[in-house]
Amino acid sequence: MSITEFRILDMLAEELNMRKTAERLYISQPALSQRLQSIEARWGKQLFIRTRKGLLLTPQGELIVEFARSVINREENVFDKLLAMEGVVQGTLKIYSGTIVAQRWLPFVFKEFVKRYPHVNIELDSGGSRRAQQAIADGKVHLAITRGETDWLGEKRYLFGDNLSLADKYHTSIEDILASERPFIRFKTDSDYDQSIMDYWQQYFHRLPEKTLVVDQIETCKQMAMSGMGYTILPLLTIDKHTDLNLMPLIQEDGTQLHRDTWLLGYKKSFQLPQVQAFVQLIEELDKEKGLLQIF
């Protein structure tokens, strides 16, 4: 089998959808179907079951996809090592990032990065921080940017602390907000973010909000607060410099503001790659010049 066929299996297993896979490969669905039939004929096994909702991997398919991904990773590792030996900043930089960082911070970093290293391709995947470590372990990315507490045992670099503030369109004091009848707009997530806020709320305000409106996106929290329908807690990273929201810091017992740490994770071997070293060096330079939360 060719490396192209291995990549087809990898994408099919990831998408479990013929149309989406064909779009990613820039080929027609009939052409993709024909390629899959050819691959299955070569192995003499059915790798995917076609259903109305999409594709399902067969047990045989799972085994062969695992093999395909190992071949892809080995090929990429060889290319990375060759580039490292030559000291050339080329290749592909693969990063997984939490959604907020990907939307609000990384575009400014990438803008400078592509100016300096035009021969490096960037692949960015974003989502919840809990998926970050798995993305590294699976070999899908070189680096992961994650927020909150982490138990990662590999290489870990601290990026920045992101202060959290109570945000409201009308009131300028926490006391007035707590006395209002409008709801607390709560960002419900599978990370420790929501729990840390609820713990702080109970410890310092001694009661949970009487009314809550739960949403699944931090941007939704911000927009609803800006409309005046309620109040929320926002990380500094999500707030525009010229916001109409009143921001009140959430101070802890030690006098520091409640915040959310952001980390850069990866394996030691990944940090040795030229494109990764270039990315880390750029971040360090931006931090010294402006501060990582002042670049956007």
Image (cartoon, rainbow, N blue to C red):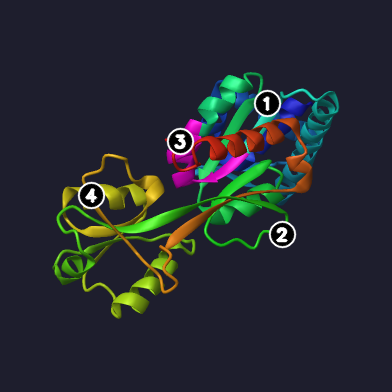
Badge 4: residue crowd in 10 Å (few <14, some 14–19, many ≥20): many
Q: CA distance from mark 2 to mark 1?
A: 41 Å
Q: Give the residue number, with chain letter if any, for mark 4.
A: 245
- Mark pair 1, 3: CA separation: 46 Å
Q: Nearer the viewer, mark 1 or mark 3?
A: 3
Kindly check if marks 4 and 3 are in contact, taking CB atoms under 8 A apart as contact: no
User: Residue under circle 1?
Assistant: 35
Q: Residues within 10 Å of mark 2 (few under 14, many from 20)?
A: few
Closer to the observer: label 2 or label 1?
2
Up the image or down, 232 lies above or below 45; here it is below
Residue flagged by tag 4: what amino acid is it? Leu
Residue 134, given in percent of the width and then of the height, sits at 65, 53
- Measure the C-alpha gap from mark 4 to mark 2: 39 Å
Which residues make up the magenta segment? 95-108
Upstream in the sequence, badge 2 or badge 1? 1
* Amino acid at pointer 1: Arg
Hey, which quadrant is residue 5 in on the image?
top right
Question: Relative to 222, does residue 80 appear above or below in the rendering?
Answer: above
Q: Check contact, mark 4 vs mark 2: CB within 8 A.
A: no
Alpha carbon distance from label 4 to label 1? 54 Å
The quarter of the rendered structure image containing the C terminus is top left
Mark 4 vs mark 3: give the one in front.
3
Q: Position of residue 241 (x, y in %)?
A: 31, 40
Q: Amino acid at mark 2?
A: Leu
Residue hosting label 3? 295
Question: Is label 2 or label 3 in front?
Answer: 3
Find disc 2 in the rendering and name its residue: 153
Marks 2 and 3, the one that precedes in the sequence: 2
